[in-house]
Amino acid sequence: MVFIAGVGRSGSTLLERVLGELPGVCSVGEVVHLWERGVRNNERCGCGAAFHDCPFWRRVGEVAFGGWANADPDRVHELQRTVDDVRYVPRLVVSRVGGEFRRALEEYNAYYERLYAAVRQVSGCHVVIDSSKRTSLAYCLRRSPRLRLRVLHVVRDSRAVAYAWTKTVRRPEVVDADSYMPRFSPAYLALLWNGHNALLQALRWLGTPRRLVRYERFMAAPEAVLADVAHFAELSIDETALSFLDDGHVRLSATHTVAGNPMRFTTGRVELRRDDEWRRSFPEGQRRVVSALTFPVGACYGYGVPRPRPAAERMSRASAE
C-alpha cells in the first residue's frame, strides 16, 4: 500500500486523485478520518453518496468487519489516543515495543490491515492509496508485518502552505450543517511544517521505503512524477496508462474517497496549474516569519535558497556599478 504523508494543503489530494487514475490503483482518501466522518457521522463519499449508502464502502465494511455495525469507532479513537500521536514517535522508533503499548499498537494496526485488505478485494486493485498524511500513523503502520508500506512524502513551499491554512474553506461533505476546515496562524503552521517534514525524512533512515514528491515539480512535470511514483509503487505502466493527462490537464473520474480537500469531489477535465496565490496575497511580514522559521528544514528541499544569477546578469550589474 502507498501512504501519502506530509502537511495538509501541500497538494496531496490532487496527487492522490491523479494517481488514482492509474490502472491497478484505488485511492480512498484520508482513511484516518473514516471512523468518525464515515462510520459515525455518515458524511459524503467522494462519489457523492452518503458513506453508508455508498455500495463500495458498504461492501468494504462487510468484507473487513462483517458490516460497519461490527466496527467500533470509539475503540479506534481510544487506541489512537494511546499510540497514534507524534509524542509516541520515540516509542514507535525503538526496535522492541512491549507491554500494553505493543498490544494496543497491534490492535490499532489490525483495523487498518483489515480495511486495506478489504479495499483491495472489493476494488480488485493491486495498490491502495491512503492519503491520511498523519505522520504518527505512518510510524504506526511501519510496525505492521502484514503491510508492505511505501510512503510518498509530499512537500510544498512552507509559505504557500502557511497561507493556505489562513483561508476559510467549507467542508462540502457535511450537508446538514455549515462545517469548515480548521485554520492556523502562519507561525504555528511553520513549526508544524518543520516538525512533520523532519519526522517524515527520518522514515527513510529507519528503512521504510519513502519517496519525496515536491508539489512544484509535480505541477511542472506531472508525467515524469507519475512515472517515478508508479515505479516506486511497483506498478507496471506504459504510455497508454497516462492517457488521462493531456496538454497540462487531467481527466478525473469519481472516486470513493472518505475525507480530504474539497477538490476530491471534482470530476472532469482539470487544469494542472501551480497555485501561487500566496505570492500575491500573503502579507510580507507573515511571509518573512514563515521563511525564517522554516529555513533550516526548507533548505533541505531547496526552498528559500537564493538562486545564483546568470553570469551575464552579474556582469551587467557590475558594469553598471
Image (cartoon, rainbow, N blue to C red):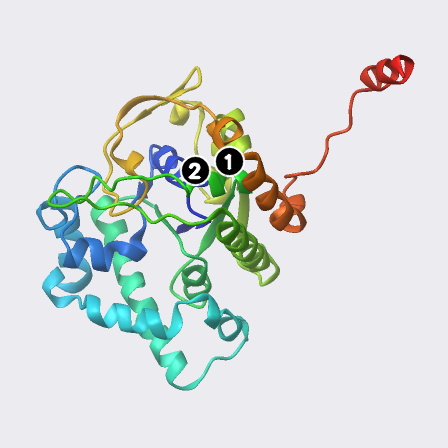
Amino acid carrying mark 2 in the image = Gly
Q: Is residue 17 left or right of residue 70?
A: right
Q: Is residue 49 left or right of residue 285?
A: left
Could you tell me residue 69's position as x and y percent?
10, 64
Residue identified by numbered label 1: 215
**Which residue corresponds to the image point at 12% horizontal and 45% vertical from the top-left?**
50
Q: Is residue 32 above or below residue 239?
A: below
| Distance CA(mark 2)–CA(mark 1) | 6 Å
Amino acid carrying mark 1 in the image = Tyr
The reply to whether residue 155 is in sight is yes
Q: Kindly identify which numbered label has been placed on residue 11.
A: 2
Q: Is disc 2 in contact with disc 1, using a CB cutoff of under 8 Å?
A: yes
Could you tell me residue 249's position as x and y percent?
39, 20
Label 1: state its secondary structure: helix
Given residues 11 and 182, the one toward you in this image is 182
Could you tell me residue 32's position as x and y percent?
31, 57
